[in-house]
Amino acid sequence: MKPNWNGANIESELRGILAECCRRDLSQVGDDADLVRELGLDSLAMLRLLAEVEMRLEVRFPDSELTRLRTLRQFAAAIRSGGGDLLPGDSSGPSTALPEGRTP
Amino acid sequence: MRIGLIAMSGVRVRTKELAELGVTLPGFVNRGRVIASLPSLGLLTVAALTPPEVEVVYREIQDVRPEDALELFDLVAISSFTAQIDEAYALADRYRAAGVPVVLGGLHVTLMPDEAAAHADSIVVNGAEGAWPRLVEDFRKGCLKPRYEGLRAGVFRAPDYVVPRFDLLRGRPYNRITVQTSRGCPLHCEFCAASLRITSSFQQKPVELALEEIRVARGVTEHPFFELADDNTFLNKTWGKEFLRGLAPMGLSWFTETDISVADDDELLRLLAASGCRQILVGLESPTADGLAGIDPGDWKRRRCDQYLRAIEKIQSHGVTVNGCFILGLDSQTPEVFPQVRDFIQKSGLIEAQVTVLTPFPGTPLYARLAREGRLLQSRFWDRCTLFDVNFRPKNMSVEELESGMRWLFREVYNDAEYARRQRHYMELVKAGAGREDPRCGSRL
């Protein structure tokens, strides 16, 4: 059964994931801190974090929002607005964007 | 004695329309900003070659505002790439007018020494190793020579090898630090204006020295992202594996440039991922074998072209993303190349793509050939050597077709929807790799 994140303390969950991935003390990093500016995460690191959140919380952020998400509070808002549900067509397998044609 | 080291940095587009288009292109602009914000490894090396009793001050051109009074030194050394060399010359002229002797060095100066000498009291050609200590000594004695030749071989051997003065970057807002593990590349692509032009052959830094530099460099800034300032890091796979085994315990994230042959070696790919390599930049140059004819003397890239798709997929499946580079305007390309590049990028699943126009940098075999064939639009166009400005007549299309085709391709490749598609693809690759033995492939940022 999929988790329902409505009303849950998502920020706390997200902070735990971030701390584990960053392997550093996040006590000074607030929910509104810009993770790119405050933690020096580059664009690929941000995407890895989003992927980790999607896996652990069983959610999927809209593709059009990926660039916009920069703070834990924005992550949480996106999850709440999506109700924690997986989007149609989502799976835990490889992306549908994988190349269609393969060379031998 | 006090020596000022001034780095010219920055990436610009001269064409107004491209500049305006570029503002909306996330990948393009991001990479440009990254390049623009890298410190000058060459000048940090010059600082390390300076006798310890001499004070060195590292500045970037942004620190030297035209409206401010010049910060005076006993001697100034300026290093610049081609696109900003005229600004470097102007600054050099300003310092000389103020009575401060100027030394010019770097790739452009090496390739165009006579031109540079007109703006300097002395020039250094090739690398600074083997030249700078003699220059400083001569300057102290009051007998500075007009030209010094640095080493073209043996640059990573004692007594000429030094660890760059990374400590000079302390307190500056860098989040990327460059370290060099090699100089040169045996492919000798006709257009290349990188370090192969200042070396007699491929030079590889011993593994222990490369690792020690990284240990030193990581101490100057918090959680740095490393960029290896190499032309082709993993030519030697045996060296590469030893280097990666040493790098893995450091817990770094890093980027480098290499060729597509890394995909041949599964063990190397596993080690790349485990060592924190986030992206490799690979010069694919053209999506079809025909387009690659004659790029390198051995036709190596043309022979590799039919393996591109499979190789990209294999590298990225290990959690290491590929930034694929394409060049527009190669002699064998026709206007068909523009949709071909777009289709290849979409089909390949490349996480990032860098599309530039063929640029005849002065001093390269390409410049000499195009000049011989009467195809250069002007003989001197250094400020247009931006990789986005057309400076020659293409063989199988007009200048206008190349310019408009490039703009069309930019819009096709760098729009928000395509960017989001590539981002999603990367996230799914991360998820697919999360179950691997090495947790770094998945969760570590």
Image (spheres, helix red, strand yellow):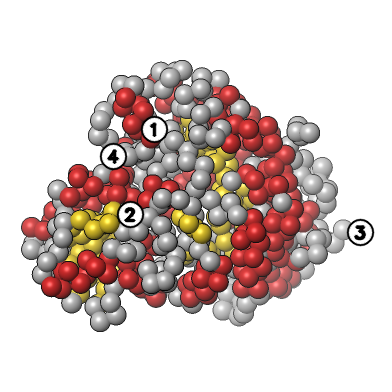
Residue identified by numbered label 3: A1
Distance of label 4 from label 2 (alpha carbons): 19 Å
Label 2 Cα neighbours within 10 Å, binned few <14 / some 14-19 / many ≥20: many
Spatial separation of the CA atoms under disc 4 and disc 3 = 63 Å
Of the image marks 1 and 4, the number of the one nearer the N terminus: 1
For marks 4 and 2, give the one nearer the viewer: 2
In this rendering, do the residues under marks 3 and 2 share a single chain? Answer: no
Earlier residue among tags 2 and 1: 2
Q: Are marks 1 and 3 in contact (CB under 8 Å)?
A: no
Q: Chain of mark 2?
A: B
Q: Secondary structure at mark 3?
A: loop
**Which residue type carries mark 1?**
Leu
Q: Are marks 1 and 4 on the same chain?
A: yes
Depth order, front residue of B183/B221: B183
Query: Badge 1 is on which residue?
Result: B366
Q: Amino acid at mark 2?
A: Asn
- Residue bearing the label numbered 4: B382
Q: CA distance from mark 3 to mark 2?
A: 65 Å
Q: CA distance from mark 2 to mark 1?
A: 20 Å
